[in-house]
Amino acid sequence: MLAEHVRDVAMTAVIFGFFATTWFGWAQEDPPRGWRPFLIAGTVAAVITAAAGGRIASQHWTATVFDEDTSRTFGIVVGIEFAAAAAGSVVLAVLRRRELMSAWIAFVVGVHLFPVAAILGYPFIYVIAVLVTIVSLVGVPIARARNVAPSAIVGAGSGASLLVGAIFSAVAAAIIG
């Protein structure tokens, strides 16, 4: 379930922690009453976890899966992710369906994590890929059924999924480091 290099596992904690904060932030666009303390707690936990991952990564900086080939492939995957997220968001804005942007971007993020897991050789990322993709697909129907903003459901679900990935990765890096 772990990548070959401690640095890669620790940096996963940093990246997932950082992006968990953005999703918890998006969930605060229009959350149900009483959700804000939990979203803030998730944000704080994500920041602490990202910082812990950064500390561990700094102690194991030399060894990584990234070389010229994997770096190029990773860059292509991330480039496709950003292009797809942007293109879909523009289409949703033109169609005046901005409320669906969080679900679209979560879908793109979830799907892009599948090749990222393969590139890093870190199978646990597949778990997070599945969780974020599921959140993206069920978030809007759940939001509609509960008369809640889709960004609240998708943001909280994606943030929680990424936080789980960040915590797992930070703990794993600490243990194997």
Image: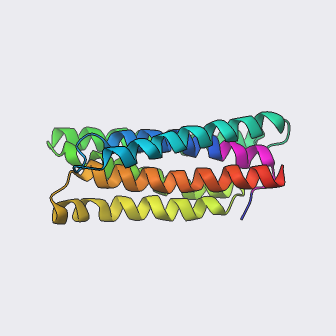
Main SS, magenta residues: helix
Asked if residue 100 lies in the magenta stretch, the reply is no
Residue pictured at 25% horizontal, 52% vertical? 150
Comparing 116 with 58, the one in front is 58
Q: Which residues are magenta?
A: 3-12
Question: In the drawing, does residue 31 fall left or right of residue 84?
Answer: left
Residue 107 visible to an observer of this rendering = no
Quadrant containing the N terminus is: bottom right
- Residue at x-position 17% and y-position 66%: 145
Q: Residue at x 65, y 46 (%)?
A: 12
Residue 164, percent across and down?
Answer: 55, 56
* Colour pattern of the rendering: rainbow
* Picture mark count: 0
The spot of residue 147 in percent (x, y) is 15, 58
Q: Position of residue 2 (x, y in %)?
A: 74, 60
Residue drawn at the location 73% of the way across and 55% of the way down: 172
Dividing the picture into quadrants, the one containing residue 87 is top left
- Left or right relative to 41: residue 119: right
Residue 89 picture location, percent across and down: 29, 41
Q: Is residue 58 visible?
A: yes
